[in-house]
Image (tube, rainbow, N blue to C red):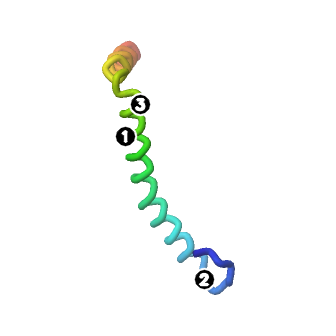
Amino acid sequence: MLCGTGDQDPSSVLVALLSYLLLMVPIQLAFFLCLALLLFGHRLPQATANAVAFTSSLA
């Protein structure tokens, strides 16, 4: 994509990069979220209770 010929203006490169990020970041986030749920799913109720207790102690 970025072959360094110099005939592309920087704005098209920026648009291509932004569209790539907008496409890839949600996919990677979903992948890591599923991975975290698979790895730490059994600890999720305790972590949720800890987070609720922490946020309620802040308020």
Q: CA distance from mark 2 to mark 3?
A: 44 Å
Look at discs 2 and 3 and give the one toward the viewer: 3
Q: Is residue 33 above or below residue 43?
A: below
The residue type indicated by label 1 comes to Cys
Seen from this angle, which residue lies furthest bottom?
A: 7
Quadrant, the N terminus: bottom right
Q: Which residue is mark 3?
A: 39
Taking depth in this image into account, of 1 and 13 the one nearest to the observer is 1
Secondary element type, mark 1: helix
Q: Residue at x 63, y 86 (%)?
A: 7
Q: Say which element carries label 2.
A: loop
**Could you classify mark 1 by the number of other residues whose Cα lies within 10 Å: few (under 14), some (14-19), or many (20 or more)?**
few
Residue 8's disc is 2
Whole-number angstrom distance, CA of label 3 to CA of label 1: 9 Å
* Residue 37 occupies quadrant: top left
Q: Mark 1 sits on what residue?
A: 34
Q: What is the distance, in whole Å, between disc 1 and disc 2 at their CAs? A: 38 Å
Task: Answer yes or no: is residue 59 visible.
Answer: no
Decide if residue 15 is on the left or right side of residue 50: right
> The C terminus lies in which quarter of the figure?
top left
Mark 3 vs 1: CB contact within 8 A: no
Q: Mark 1 or mark 2: which is in front?
A: 1
Q: Callout 3 environment at 10 Å: few (<14), some (14 to 19), or many (20+)?
A: few
Q: Position of residue 15 (x, y in %)?
A: 50, 71
